[in-house]
Image: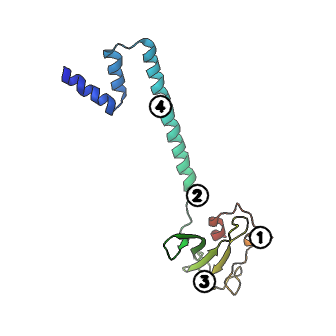
Amino acid sequence: MLRFNSVFFFLLHIVPTFSNLVYLLVQKKLTYFVAVGVFFFFFWKLINIFIILTLSILSQKYSQKNLPLYGFVAVPTKNPDGTMNLMNWECAIPGKKGTPWEGGLFKLRMLFKDDYPSSPPKCKFEPPLFHPNVYPSGTVCLSILEEDKDWRPAITIKQKIWA
C-alpha cells in the first residue's frame, strides 16, 4: 500500500487531474468548504478554457478573412551584412486575370522614407511597364501614394500593393 500511495503522490505532482483531486477529497477527508473551493476552481478553469477556445476560433475566422493575397509577395531587402532593410521592399504582383497583364509577375520596389507612415512610400516597377497608373519611368501614379492627396498613415502595405 505504501508503494501505491507514493506513486499516486508522484502523479499528483506531475499530472494534476480531477481524479487526483477526488483522491484527495476521499482519502484526506478534506472539509466541505475546501471541496466547494476545489469545485469552483475547476469550474473557473473550464470557463477559462471555453473563453480561450472561443477566442481562438474567432481569431482563426478573422485571420481567414485577412489572408494574404494569392500570388502577391512583399519582403524587405537584405543589407550586405545580412540584416533586413525595412526601408526598401521588393514586391511581386501577379497580372490580373482577364487583362493584358494576365500570367505576368511584375516586380515592384517600395522605398520608405524615415518619417513613414507620415509620408507615403515611393513605388516603382522595375522594369517599367505600360499601365494607365504607371509613369513611363515605372513610378506608380495613385492618389493614395501622394502625400498631398489621399495618403493616410493607416493604409497598409497590403492595401498599397493591391491597389
Of callouts 1 and 4, the N-terminal one: 4
Q: Secondary structure at mark 2?
A: loop
Q: Amino acid at mark 1?
A: Glu
Q: Which residue is mark 2?
A: 66
Q: Which residue is mark 3?
A: 126
- Disc number lying in front (1 or 2): 1
Of callouts 4 and 2, the N-terminal one: 4
Q: Amino acid at mark 4?
A: Leu
Q: Which mark is residue 147?
A: 1
Of callouts 3 and 1, the N-terminal one: 3
Q: Which residue is mark 4?
A: 46
- Disc number lying in front (2 or 3): 3
Q: Is residue 46 above or below residue 126?
A: above
In percent of width and height, residue 16 lies at 36, 30
Q: Which mark is residue 4?
A: none
Q: Alpha-carbon distance for marks 1 and 2?
A: 26 Å
Q: Is residue 151 above or below residue 136?
A: above
Quadrant of residue 93 in the image? bottom right
Q: Alpha-carbon distance for marks 4 and 3?
A: 56 Å
Residue in the image at 54% along x and 79% along y? 103
Q: Residues within 10 Å of mark 1 (few under 14, many from 20)?
A: some
- Residue 13 visible somewhere in the drawing: yes
